[in-house]
Image (tube, helix red, strand yellow):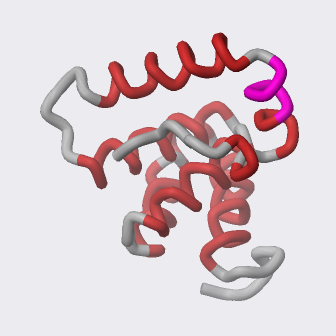
Amino acid sequence: MADEVDDTDELPSTAGEFADEYPDVWEQYADLGEACAASGPIDGESKRLVKLGLAVAAQSEGAVHSHVRRALDEDVSPEALRQVAILSIPTVGFPQAMAALSWIDDLVDGDDGDEDW
């Protein structure tokens, strides 16, 4: 489960611009992510779901989109991704969880997230 993006053209515009402008900082940041991912026994899919949960709790739409995109690329089920948002209800609150669910559905549904699931 590599979180590093080798081609900065694949990054969202702000992150890609940062990586291009500060390649040494970007490389160190990517290395830190790799070291953290390799620091324990958690399997790849579980790591992906944990990272999605952290993005949900931080209420970072961009990070939620990023982790959902990566999870789908790694064949994590849409149901598991949605459960992360549902599990966050008691911790982050219903409105925040619903926002996260809509961000997940942006990518799962391939539209603006307004479709029923």
Residue positioned most to the left:
41
Q: Residue at x 83, y 20 (%)?
A: 21
Residue 62 location, x and y as percent?
A: 74, 45
Q: Is residue 110 positioned above or below 56 on the image?
A: below
Is residue 71 shown left or right of residue 89?
Answer: left
Disc tally is: 0
Residue 102 location, x and y as percent?
A: 72, 65
Q: Residue at x 75, y 49 (%)?
A: 9
Is residue 15 located in the magenta-colored stretch of the structure?
no
Q: Is residue 95 positioned above or below 31 on the image?
A: below
Is residue 52 shown left or right of residue 19?
Answer: left
Q: Between 42 and 89, which is closer to the camera in this rendering?
A: 42
Q: Is residue 50 positioned above or below 17 on the image?
A: below
Q: Main secondary structure of the magenta part?
A: helix
Residue 28 location, x and y as percent?
A: 54, 13
Q: Between 3 and 93, which is closer to the camera in this rendering?
A: 3
Q: Between 48 and 5, which is closer to the camera in this rendering?
A: 5
Q: Residue at x 51, y 57 (%)?
A: 70
Is residue 98 shown left or right of residue 69?
Answer: right
Is residue 12 shown left or right of residue 2?
Answer: right
Residue 101 location, x and y as percent?
A: 64, 62
Q: If the image is split into quadrants, where does the C terminus sit?
A: bottom right
Where are the magenta residues, as a range?
17-21
Residue positioned most to the bottom:
116
Q: Residue at x 35, y 21 (%)?
A: 36
